[in-house]
Image (spheres, rainbow, N blue to C red):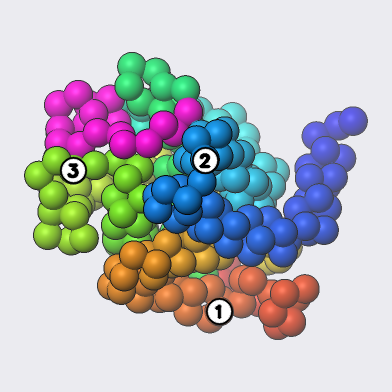
């Protein structure tokens, strides 16, 4: 089977299972994670690292399927460098507290390398790509301006962490011993995210052609379904713990998805957007 045939098969697998991937998995993930945090599950199931990683990989699959045809040598090298950076900056953070502030993992997130979960790139890089794609759609022709595009995507990544970190802290995924002003998260964490988001956004901007990404978006109805999963999963978790500002930010991403009509056809019954005006 050649590459194009394999990519077409993966696309079909995602299309045929959109609801399961993008709604069922995050809803069940939220229930299992909250139940784990509340001590309602027995040890084999409570915060099971394999289930966490598997669920994350499944929810990432629409984005991976969407981006896969665009991966050439330049993209592979840039993403590889970003993977190395993500491990390096996390190692620095775990062992020195720089740049995020002192923290430690409170939950087993699977195999680690020098104290850093091996699944880290799976957790981090897709968040940045989701933000990049959503911002590109929302900005339209204005996304041709690289400074505006980069600043807007960095801001979107930071907004995603305004949702992610409070929920993760509430679950006990990671712990800031000294606490923090924002639902137990210190402001130093967001200073660190400015750095990491900037590096990641610039790397992806170099790796992929904006025009090619938008063309692929116009051809695939599912490419931002991973962001739908993010809104459902972390919105629900934050709502359970009463973190209402993160819930509102998550709803903001939901509004952006509706505006760009990216969770469409088979689930919301809305037409696919026409993107030709963007390039």
The residue lying furthest to the top in this view is 114
Q: Earlier in the sequence, mark 2 or mark 1?
A: 2
The residue sitting at 55% across, 79% down in the picture is: 258
Q: Secondary structure at mark 2?
A: loop
Instruction: Pick whichever, 122 or 111, lies toward us.
Output: 111
Q: Secondary structure at mark 3?
A: loop
- Residue 163 occupies which quadrant of the picture? bottom left
What separation in Å lies between label 1 and label 3 (alpha carbons)?
A: 35 Å
x and y, in percent, of residue 180 in the image: 13, 53
The residue sitting at 64% across, 46% down in the picture is: 58
Q: Earlier in the sequence, mark 1 or mark 3?
A: 3
Labels 2 and 3 touching (C-beta < 8 A): no
Quadrant of the snapshot with the N terminus: top right
Can you identify the residue that label 1 sits on?
Answer: 258
Quadrant of the snapshot with the C terminus: bottom right
What separation in Å lies between label 2 and label 3 (alpha carbons)?
A: 26 Å
Q: Earlier in the sequence, mark 2 or mark 3?
A: 2
Left or right side of 212 for 185: left
Local crowd size for mark 1, using a 10 Å CA cut-off: few (<14), some (14–19), many (≥20): some
**Highlighted magenta segment, given as a residue range:** 90-110
x and y, in percent, of residue 270 in the image: 70, 82
Instruction: Pick whichever, 116 or 80, lies toward us.
Output: 116
Taking the image as drawn, is residue 258 in sight? yes
Q: Is residue 162 above or below residue 177?
A: below
In the image, residue 125 lies in the stretch drawn in magenta:
no
Q: Secondary structure at mark 1?
A: helix
Left or right side of 90 for 31: right
What separation in Å lies between label 2 and label 1 (alpha carbons)?
A: 38 Å
Foreground: disc 2 or disc 3: 2
Q: Is residue 226 above or below residue 120?
A: below
Can you identify the residue that label 3 sits on?
Answer: 176
The residue sitting at 21% across, 60% down in the picture is: 183
């Amino acid at each position: 089977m050649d590459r194009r045939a394999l990519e077409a098969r993966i696309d079909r697998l995602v299309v045929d299972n959109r609801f399961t991937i993008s709604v069922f998995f995050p809803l069940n993930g939220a229930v299992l994670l909250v139940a784990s945090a509340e001590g309602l599950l027995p040890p084999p199931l409570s915060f099971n690292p394999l289930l966490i990683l598997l669920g994350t990989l499944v929810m990432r699959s629409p984005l991976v399927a969407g981006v896969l045809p665009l991966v050439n040598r330049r993209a592979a090298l840039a993403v590889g460098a970003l993977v190395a950076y993500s491990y390096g900056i996390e190692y620095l953070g775990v062992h020195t507290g720089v740049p995020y502030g002192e923290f430690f993992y409170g939950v087993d997130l699977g195999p680690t390398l020098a104290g850093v979960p091996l699944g880290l790139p799976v957790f981090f890089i897709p968040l940045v790509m989701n933000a990049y794609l959503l911002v590109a759609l929302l900005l339209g022709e204005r996304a041709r301006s690289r400074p505006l595009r980069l600043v807007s995507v960095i801001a979107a990544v930071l907004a995603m962490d305004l949702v992610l970190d409070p929920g993760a802290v509430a679950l006990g995924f990671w712990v800031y011993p000294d606490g923090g002003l924002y639902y137990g998260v210190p402001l130093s964490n967001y200073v660190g995210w400015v750095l990491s988001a900037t590096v990641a956004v610039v790397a992806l901007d170099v790796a992929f052609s904006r025009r090619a990404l938008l063309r692929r978006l116009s051809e695939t109805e599912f490419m931002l379904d991973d962001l739908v999963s993010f809104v459902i999963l972390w919105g629900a978790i934050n709502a359970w713990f009463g973190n209402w500002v993160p819930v509102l930010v998550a709803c903001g991403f939901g509004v952006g998805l509706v505006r760009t009509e990216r969770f469409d056809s088979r689930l919301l019954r809305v037409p696919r957007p026409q993107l030709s005006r963007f390039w």
